[in-house]
Amino acid sequence: MTKKPTYKELEQRVKELEKKIDVLKGAEEAICKSESRLKETEQIANIGHWELDLATNTLYWSDEIYRILDLDPKEFGATYEAFLDTVHPEDRKFVDRAYTDSVKNKSGYDIVHRLLLRDGTIKYVHEKCQTKYDEDGKALCSIGTLQDITKLKQEEHSFASIIGRDVKMKELFEMIRDVTEVDIPVLIQGESGTGKELVAKAIHNEGPRANKPFVPVNCGALPEGLLESELFGHVKGAFTGALRDRKGRFEMAHGGTLFLDEVVDLSRVMQVKLLRVLQEGKFERVGSEKTISTDVRIISAANRDLKYEVTKGNFRDDLYYRICVIPINLPPLRERKNDIPLLIENFLEKASYKGHSTEGISKDALAYMIDHSWPGNVRELQSAIHYALIKSKGRIIQPDHLPLELSKQKVDQTSRRPFRKLNSKSVKDALIRSGGNKAKAARILGVGRATLYRFLTDFTDVSSSIYESD
């Protein structure tokens, strides 16, 4: 017969149970704290983790991955196929092939690809994966990480809101960095629509005057009489309609930067008056005898060759040498066509923030846009994208969604198909050497990117075994 425990024995057992409960509670609290720290760390690093059960095709995502993908875990069933649906259509085949090959070859993978969110936002992610196997070599589960590197990717191909990865743009970024700390006049020259004011703002914002005003004035938009008042201000009664004293742009920009856009259009009289201010740092308002001192950095811009205007006698040489201490020349878009896909992606992403969703742009439409000469430069490209977004109504942008001058451009079949340089073997070898990067492959082959795109469109079997990458 089992002996009943005494009261003291029962009391001792209760205390031991209470101690075990306290230990379990402590362990639970430690786990909760650890999970909380992990979530905070993932959020700071923009990196989430995932696990895919290959037997059940059940995919677990950490909270950070749901945040990166802008999805609600209560409304979204996480499976491998569901994840592929979030991958950018142009990268989907590449990502799927990378994963299936890594499982087959037991190699894991480390890739960068794009996501296309439901609102049209494009994100860049860095993904790593390893797969676990049983003793017989059967794949059990895959585990990996997903890091949002969109900001890093944007910074890699941009500087102070200027987009570009072309060599000419990299040189421009370096030039901007060089002149920001040197407080001397800069002349920016380039065709209309190339982004001269963006460069001027970058020089201002990256320099010591960044917390002071940046004041632009279009010298070609106003007649001479109004331009003088615009630059130097006026006093009450100086002319008909001058009902009160008014500061000019030089006073508004005091301590900061004055951006003289289209300075080439200044009249000879205004050139003399501007020269005096630049030489002496002083001026008078229209109708006033009081001299005002000014401290501004001058950045000028011209859409024509100012040196040529000097030789023609249209622009004073002494003023030219005052404003052109450091010349910066902006390349037209036709000379940096490998930036066109990057600019398009940037415009589509900005449009998505304003409610213009899209599934992206087709390769045929992209080829048309790369072929176009873009006389209006980046400004024309942006307008073309806005037009295409309206016409495509949220679908993938096709050639017939582009403005008339692009969609109906007649391209000679011979010029559109300079395939004598290309053959399936050389293209495949170039794609392998470039890791699937079409821009690098085109450079290896010595042809334009649009030419390579058209070849791959006509010979789809060439790229079927190559990872696709832009």
Image (cartoon, helix red, strand yellow):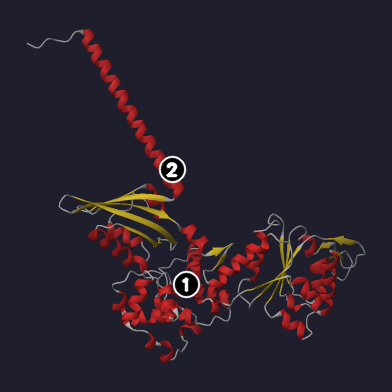
Image location of residue 408, percent across then percent down:
46, 86
Quarter of the image holding residue 231?
Answer: bottom right
SS for callout 2 = helix
> What residue is rendered at 33% in x and 27% in y?
25
- Viewer can see residue 422: yes
Q: Nearer the viewer, residue 341 or 407?
A: 341
Instruction: Find disc 1 in the rendering and name its residue.
Output: 341
> In the image, residue 266 lies at what x, y percent?
77, 77
Q: What crowding class fits label 2: few (fewer than 14 Cα within 10 Å), some (14-19), or many (20 or more)? A: few
- Seen in the picture, residue 202 relative to 385 is either above or below; the reply is above
Residue drawn at 45 percent across, 57 percent down: 149
- Which residue position holds label 2? 40
Count of residue discs:
2
- Observer-nearest of 218 and 431: 431
Residue 116 image point, x, y percent: 40, 63
The residue at 29%/57% (across/down) is: 108
